[in-house]
Amino acid sequence: MFAVIKQGGRQYTVKPGDVIKVDRFEAEVNSAVELTDVLVVSGDKLLVGAPVVDGAKVQATVVRHEKGDKILVFKRKRRKDYKKRIGHRSQYTTLKINDIKVG
């Protein structure tokens, strides 16, 4: 059984037991989280929502909050003596998928 969920503007395909990184959201570490924006559930039969499947939930546990690798952005304009280097580190929340419930 798998499900397609929407979290933080992105879509993820998950199965029970998966560990995924999503954009950071406020939740305590080791707390249970219910994701209700479930778009597709595949089990005995395929359920596709319009846009979400009614009554479907994905239960997950927050494993940790972390920062990703530093990404450098370098801007330059030729012949103008313009150079700019900036960087940022995206923040993530790691989730462990426990269960997928329908209905």
Image (tube, rainbow, N blue to C red):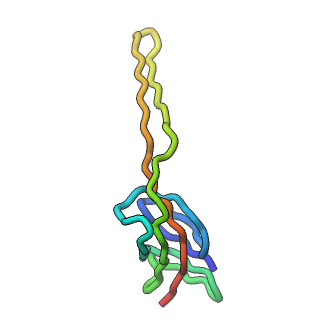
Q: How many marks?
A: 0
Q: Tell me if residue 6 comes above or below residue 69 in the rendering.
A: below
In the rendering, at what x and y percent does residue 83 appear?
42, 18
Residue 43 vs residue 30, the one in the foreground:
30
Specify the quadrant of the image occupied by residue 87.
Answer: top left
Q: Nearer the viewer, residue 26 or 15?
A: 26
Residue 60 location (% of width, % of height): 49, 73
Residue at 51%, 85% in the rendered image: 101
The N terminus: image quadrant: bottom right
Seen at 40% across and 10% down, the residue is 80
Q: Which residue occupies the extreme front position in the image?
A: 30
Q: Quick check: 99 above or below 18?
A: below
* Image position, residue 27 (x, y; %): 36, 65
What's the residue at 44%, 64% (across, down)? 7
55 on left or right of 48: left
Does residue 46 appear to the left or right of 57 in the view shown?
Answer: right
**To which quarter of the image does residue 36 belong?**
bottom left
Front residue of 94/11: it is 94
In the orientation shown, which residue stands out farthest toward the left? 26
